C-alpha cells in the first residue's frame, strides 16, 4: 500500500524537465570548481532557486547558497548538496568533459547539485501538496571538510532557521537504480596527519656526514603499515593510507627533511585515538633510531566526523524510497570507509538521514569483470577516479529520492 508521501512524490515528479536537468548537469560537469571557489556553480544554483520562488542568499560560509521556501505551518526540512570538484585530470572522454585543466567533478557533486535543483523546483511547483518550510543548501568545500562548519559559523541557522531534519545523498558506484540505506553508522571518520622528519643534509657522496631523512621516512612508511594489522583488533574497521611522501631536490643531495602525508579512516573514537597515538610513537621511534637531530613534527589536520544516521529518520526515508522505487531497490550495505562533513550541519543534535544513489551505467556494470558485487565494485570506476562517469539515467531518480525524502517529514496534504 502506497503512503500519502509516496503518492505525492510520484505526482510531483511525474513531469520533471529531464532534458533541462541533464543540460544543467552537463554544464556543471564542464565547469568544475575547487573547494571555496564554487562561484559559478553557486550562481547557477541560486538563480534556479530564485526562479522557483525561494528566498535565496549567496556567499554563506564563503560560497554557500541557501534557499528558503516557507509554505505554512509544519516541520522544517533541510536538503543539502555539496558543490566542489577535485584536483583530478579528467580521462572520461565524454563530450561534456571538464574544460578546466586538472579539475574534475570526479565525485558526483555536479550530479548532487542537479538533483537538488530538480527537487527544489518540483517541491516549489507542488507546494499545494505539503506544508512546512523547505531549506535548500548548496554547500561548498566538502572535499576539504570545511564547508559545513563554515556555513554553520556564518549563521546558517540563526539567519534561516534551525531545521527539524537534515537530508543528504551521494552518488556511488554500483548498478544504477539502487538506494543503499544504513540506520546508524554509514560513513567513517577521516583524519589527515602530516609528519615532518628532520635530518641533516649534505652531499650524496658523504652519507656518513649526514642523517638521511629519506631512509628514515622509508622505514616510517613501512612501519606504519603495522598499525592496522598489529594494533587494531580484527573486529574493528580501520584504514591507514600514506598518500604522499616528499623529499629532496636533486640526485646527489641528501635533503634536510622529508614530509609524509597520511590519512586514517576509523569507525570509533577509541580506535582513532589509538591509531593517532601509534603514529606519533612510531614516528618518534624511527627518528630516534636514525639519530635525527630533532623530534619529528606530527600534525593532525582535516578531520571528518563519523556519519551516523538517526535510525528513525533513516527508516522513514528508506520506507518511502522502497515504495517509490520498488522492492529490492533499498538495502543495507553496512558502513563504508568513505567520509563526509555533512554531520557537522547537525550540531550533534539534529536528526539526519544520509543515503547513496548508485550511478554506474548498465553497460559498464555488465562488462565489468567478476561475478560478485564486491568483485564488480572493485572493477568499475569509483568516486575520485578520473574515469568516474555517472549515468544520466539517474538524473530523474535522484531528484525523486530527495522529493520523496522531504515529503516523508513535511506535512503532506
Image: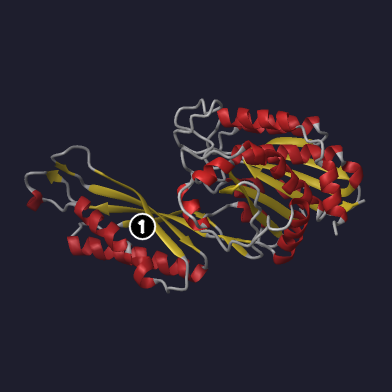
Q: Position of residue 361 (x, y in %)?
A: 58, 41
**Can you see residue 315?**
yes
Which residue sits at x=26%, y=66%?
A: 285
Q: Position of residue 376 (x, y in %)?
A: 49, 52
Colour setting? secondary structure
Is the N terminus in the top left, top right, bottom left or bottom right quadrant? bottom right
Quadrant of residue 120 within the rendered picture: top right
**Can you see residue 62?**
no
Q: Count the marks: how many?
A: 1
Residue 57 placement, left or right of 362: right
Q: Position of residue 146 (x, y in %)?
A: 56, 47
Residue of label 1: 298
Q: Position of residue 261 (x, y in %)?
A: 36, 51
Q: Is residue 50 above or below residue 388?
A: above
Residue 331 placement, left or right of 305: right
Which residue sits at x=58%, y=43%?
A: 362
Q: Secondary structure at mark 1?
A: strand
Q: Is residue 27 above or below residue 413?
A: above
Check disc 1: other Cα within 10 Å, few if <14, some if 14-19, many if 20+: some
Quadrant of residue 203 within the rendered picture: top left
Which residue sits at x=76%, y=32%?
A: 17
Q: Nearer the viewer, residue 260 or 378?
A: 378
Amino acid at each position: 500500500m502506497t503512503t500519502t508521501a509516496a503518492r505525492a512524490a510520484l505526482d510531483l515528479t511525474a513531469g520533471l524537465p529531464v532534458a533541462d536537468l541533464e543540460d544543467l548537469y552537463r554544464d556543471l560537469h564542464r565547469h568544475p570548481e575547487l573547494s571555496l571557489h564554487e562561484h559559478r556553480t553557486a550562481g547557477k544554483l541560486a538563480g534556479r532557486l530564485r526562479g522557483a520562488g525561494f528566498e535565496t542568499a549567496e556567499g554563506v560560509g564563503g560560497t554557500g547558497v541557501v534557499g528558503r521556501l516557507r509554505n505554512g505551518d509544519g516541520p522544517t526540512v533541510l536538503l543539502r548538496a555539496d558543490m566542489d570538484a577535485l584536483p583530478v585530470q579528467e580521462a572520461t572522454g565524454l563530450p561534456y568533459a571538464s574544460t578546466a585543466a586538472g579539475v574534475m567533478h570526479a565525485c558526483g557533486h555536479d550530479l548532487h547539485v542537479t538533483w537538488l535543483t530538480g527537487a527544489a523546483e518540483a517541491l516549489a511547483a507542488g507546494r499545494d501538496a505539503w506544508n512546512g518550510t523547505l531549506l535548500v543548501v548548496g554547500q561548498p568545500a566538502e572535499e576539504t571538510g570545511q564547508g559545513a562548519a563554515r556555513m554553520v559559523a556564518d549563521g546558517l541557522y540563526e539567519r534561516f532557521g534551525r531545521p527539524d531534519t537534515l537530508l543528504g545523498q551521494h552518488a556511488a558506484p554500483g548498478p544504477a537504480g539502487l538506494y543503499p540505506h544504513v540506520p546508524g553508522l554509514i560513513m567513517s571518520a577521516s583524519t589527515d596527519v602530516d609528519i615532518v622528519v628532520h635530518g641533516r643534509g649534505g652531499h650524496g657522496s658523504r652519507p656518513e656526514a649526514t642523517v638521511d631523512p629519506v631512509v628514515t621516512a622509508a622505514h616510517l612508511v613501512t612501519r606504519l603499515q603495522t598499525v592496522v594489522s598489529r594494533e587494531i583488533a580484527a573486529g574493528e574497521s580501520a584504514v591507514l593510507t600514506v598518500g604522499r611522501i616528499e623529499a629532496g631536490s636533486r640526485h646527489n643531495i641528501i635533503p634536510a627533511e622529508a614530509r609524509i602525508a597520511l590519512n586514517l579512516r576509523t569507525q570509533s573514537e577509541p580506535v582513532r585515538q589509538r591509531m593517532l597515538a601509534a603514529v606519533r610513537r612510531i614516528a618518534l621511534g624511527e627518528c630516534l633510531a636514525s639519530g635525527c637531530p630533532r623530534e619529528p613534527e606530527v600534525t593532525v589536520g582535516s578531520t571528518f566526523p563519523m556519519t551516523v544516521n538517526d535510525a528513525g529518520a533513516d527508516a522513514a526515508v528508506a520506507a518511502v524510497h522502497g515504495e517509490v522505487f520498488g522492492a529490492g531497490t533499498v538495502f543495507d550495505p553496512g558502513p563504508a570507509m568513505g567520509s563526509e562533513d555533512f554531520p557537522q550541519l547537525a550540531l550533534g543534535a539534529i536528526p539526519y538521514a544520509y543515503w547513496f544513489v548508485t550511478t554506474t551505467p548498465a553497460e559498464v556494470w555488465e562488462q565489468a569483470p567478476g561475478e560478485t558485487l564486491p568483485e564488480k565494485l572493485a572493477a568499475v570506476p569509483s568516486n575520485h577516479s578520473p574515469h568516474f562517469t555517472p549515468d544520466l539515467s539517474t538524473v530523474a531518480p535522484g531528484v525523486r529520492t530527495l522529493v520523496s525524502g522531504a515529503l516523508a517529514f513535511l506535512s503532506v496534504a
